């Protein structure tokens, strides 16, 4: 199993989640001309999504680091 590829895929997923949460927060308080000031975004849900994206990124970065250490160990053993 290629842990690096899995971790990179996870980082892409975290980036997409981060962008989606940021867009939700950016739209907070935005109103259309037809509608009275109605907030359609739950800030608490978006903050939770941001924290989740942060944790997902940190975990996948640690996985990449560990995969690199394993590869280095394998190279050292083969040398």
Image (cartoon, helix red, strand yellow):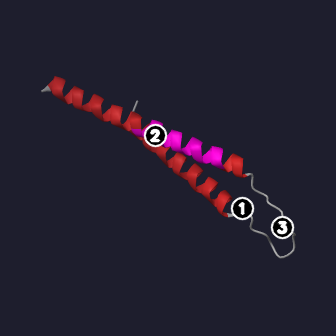
* Residue toward you, 26 or 4: 26
The label on residue 37 is 3
Return the residue at label 2: 58
Tell me the magenta residue range.
47-61
Q: Is residue 39 above or below residue 60?
A: below
Return the residue at label 1: 28
Q: Can residue 60 be found in the magenta stretch?
A: yes
C-alpha span from label 3 to label 2: 37 Å
Q: Is residue 34 above or below residue 50?
A: below
Query: Answer yes or no: do the residues labelled 1 and 3 have beta carbons within 8 Å?
Result: no
**Residue 14 position within the rendered picture, expressed as x and y whole percent measured from the top left:** 53, 46
Task: Classify mark 3: helix, strand or loop.
Answer: loop
Relative to 30, is 18 on the left or the right? left
Task: Classify mark 1: helix, strand or loop.
Answer: loop
Query: Answer yes or no: do the residues labelled 2 and 1 have beta carbons within 8 Å?
Result: no
Nearer-N-terminus badge (1/3): 1
Residue for point 65% across, 63% down? 26
**Residue 56 position within the rendered picture, expressed as x and y whole percent measured from the top left:** 52, 40
Q: Is residue 36 above or below residue 16?
A: below
Task: Classify mark 2: helix, strand or loop.
Answer: helix
Q: Quadrant of residue 77?
A: top left
């Amino acid at each position: 199993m290629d842990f690096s590829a899995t971790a990179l895929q996870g980082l892409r997923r975290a980036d997409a989640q981060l962008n989606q949460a940021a867009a939700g927060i950016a739209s907070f308080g935005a109103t259309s001309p037809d509608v009275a000031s109605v907030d359609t975004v739950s800030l608490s849900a978006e903050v939770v999504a941001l924290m989740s994206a942060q944790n997902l990124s940190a975990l996948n970065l640690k996985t990449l680091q560990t995969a690199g250490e394993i590869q280095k160990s394998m190279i050292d053993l083969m040398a």
